[in-house]
Amino acid sequence: MPSWQGKSKGTTFGYSIFVAVIKKFGVRPAYALLAIVAFYYFLFSFKTSKIIYGFYRERLHYGRFSSLLKLYRNYYRLGQTLIDKIAIMSGAAVNFTFNFDGEENLRQISALQKGGLLLSAHIGNWEIAGYLLKRLNTRINIVMFDGEHQKIKEYLKSVTGETTAKIIVIKNDLSHIFEINEALKNNELVCMHADRFVEGNKTVEANFLGSPAKFPLGPFLLAAKFKVPVAFVFALKETTFHYHFFSTEAKDYSMHEKDESVAQMLKGFAKAMEEKVKTYPEQWFNYYDFWKQ
């Protein structure tokens, strides 16, 4: 099964074109340009198209035409999340609105003075979710692979500025574990994806959309080890300029043994993912073979 490589597509030149359009003409013209770019990926990105088309056909059981239409819209939605990120974080004059379901759950985690782990997935706009969490008035740490091309990272930073969250980069020497531990000791929130793994990572299986799928063991093992409250969070685009943020109730799995704690967390996470994928199928941005072969 091919694993995710921790990198996204695109070039600095491509990003710069969209940034220029956003600044000079606004978000809607950028969306119009995106329609052409998305069609290019729809036609020529064979590897990812095969995977996401199979997801619509085999997992959600859409017809052939509907699956092709969803495939194009998937690329288009992915591009919109990038445009929205640039527009919001750079302070462009765009009137985005947001709903917050479950914000009280995250405030309850902060009130416990134990730190907390927020698990999310490549559904919707995770970077927008991290940006919105600043309203909690607590330190936010985002754990991520350092797979983005360096030139693209530097260029986007020059456009959007420094993020308000602290980035904890996953490293081979496992030093990120100590950073996570320190953040939790300081009653901070730690956010990370729990739906992708890279080659060599340990995995654990759970039923997802009717078949066994592999999830990275690390995020669930961390929560079990540090015995902190856990919530699942997502940010989904609902209309052109409106996002909906969701957080489940925070749960404490510390009363279970490690293996049982991991199993319970994974079951709850897979269920939460499944609900969001079925509701927002065009915003499932997992372009690799997710299910066990």
Image: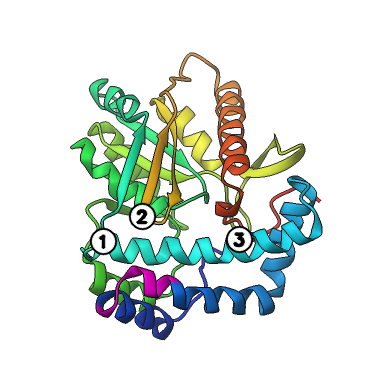
First in sequence: mark 3 vs mark 1: 3
Q: Nearer the viewer, residue 227 or 61?
A: 61
Tag 1 near tag 2, CB within 8 Å: yes
For the N terminus, which image quadrant? bottom right
Compared across the picture, whether 136 is left or right of 39 comes to: left
Q: Magenta part mainly helix, strand or loop?
A: helix
- Range of the magenta residues? 24-31
Residue 60 x, y percent position in the rendering: 73, 45
Compared across the picture, whether 279 is left or right of 153 comes to: right
> What type is the residue that disc 2 sits on?
Phe
Judge whether 285 appears above or below 59 on screen: below
Q: Which residue is mark 1?
A: 94
- Residue at image position (76%, 37%) is 210
Q: Nearer the viewer, residue 266 or 37?
A: 37
Q: Which residue is mark 3?
A: 4
What whole-number distance in Å separates the C-alpha atoms at marks 3 and 2?
30 Å
Q: Nearer the viewer, mark 3 or mark 1?
A: 1
Residue 29 included in the magenta stretch of the image? yes
Q: Residues within 10 Å of mark 2 (few under 14, many from 20)?
A: some
